[in-house]
Image: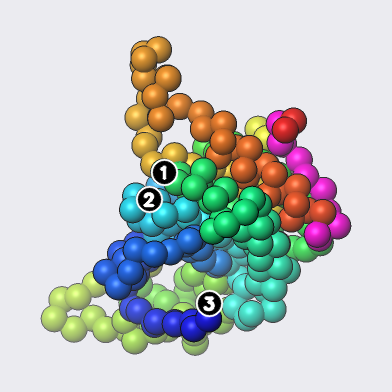
Amino acid sequence: MQSMASLLTAPCWLCTALCFRQSRHFDLVVSGINRGDNLGLHVIYSGTVGAAQEAAIKGVPAIAVSLDNYKALTPDGFQAGAAYIVAFVQALCSRGQGAHPQLSHLTNAVVNINIPAQDPFHGFYLAHQGSGIVDLNYQQVTKDTVDQKEGHMMEAYGNEQQAKTPNILDQSNGVRTFRNFAGEMRWDMASGSDSWAVKQGWVSITPLGLRSDIIFSQELSKSAHSTHPELIQTVTAAMHIAAHSLGVSVGGTPKL
């Protein structure tokens, strides 16, 4: 079977959209692994989740994957989490006969996966979306002040020289440069939430719907906007298969 890879410089969702210009015959779209988590309310801003949502909008099953470690600057930092994702995807694709029929249960949704910063992991945990979020803290960066900045950006880039990108120093024609140094974290450590699961050492798996309106009638609750039992069953079964292959545990899942 022939494989094809493309290199695109574009926002995450646009990369997905451009791929669909060439073909719509995809079994599964995997977005990530992103450097930095997409837990709780971070999915609102997430390009990684957005790329998966773009595929789901087009009716293709999609997974978004993020690593809760923005200091992971080499492939070694991603290897342990990547092994879990491979096992999970193989489990999804191995269920049933024919051209992966179980993947059809993942349409109109995104499976959002977050990997803890440090392994070994406990296993997979089926978690609900929490409400945790880091407050944005955009500050102007200049040649004179970049050395004085500390926090998220400096730690993420590893050292000051790497943080001094040409864009930061370009102040010509009245251009001002701002970077997010990250503010206070508003944690959601409720038991069973995605943030809680990852901080406890679990690889969290959270199915996300494409709609975000609040259900206000019984009629709406019976629509496709409500719980998708086949989706949950498919994800749960894949978690158990993947966990068995890795010799790890599963948490948070309903009985099959």
Residue drawn at (58%, 44%) of the image: 206
In primary-sequence order, the first of circles 2 and 1 is 2
Q: Is residue 236 visible?
A: yes
Q: Is residue 101 left or right of residue 11?
A: right
Up the image or down, 201 lies above or below 207; here it is below
Q: Which residue has dot 2 on it?
A: 59
Spatial CA span between label 1 and label 3: 36 Å
Mark found first going from the N terminus, 1 or 3 = 1
Query: In the picture shown, does residue 219 fall above or below 227?
Result: above
Cα distance in 3D space between marks 3 and 2: 37 Å
Residue 16, x across and y down, in percent: 36, 65
Question: Element type at marker 3?
Answer: helix
Label disc, if present, on residue 157 of the rendered structure: 3
Mark 2 crowdedness (10 Å alpha carbons): few <14, some 14-19, many ≥20:
some
Taking depth in this image into account, of 173 and 196 the one nearest to the observer is 196
Q: Nearer the viewer, mark 3 or mark 2?
A: 2
Q: Which region shows up in magenta?
A: 245-254
Task: Answer yes or no: is residue 45 visible.
Answer: no
Q: Is residue 97 left or right of residue 152?
A: right
The residue labelled by disc 1 is: 108
Camera-side residue of 57 and 195: 57
Q: Position of residue 154 (x, y in %)?
A: 52, 73
Residue drawn at x 44%, y 82% is 5
Which quadrant of the structure image shows residue 81?
bottom right
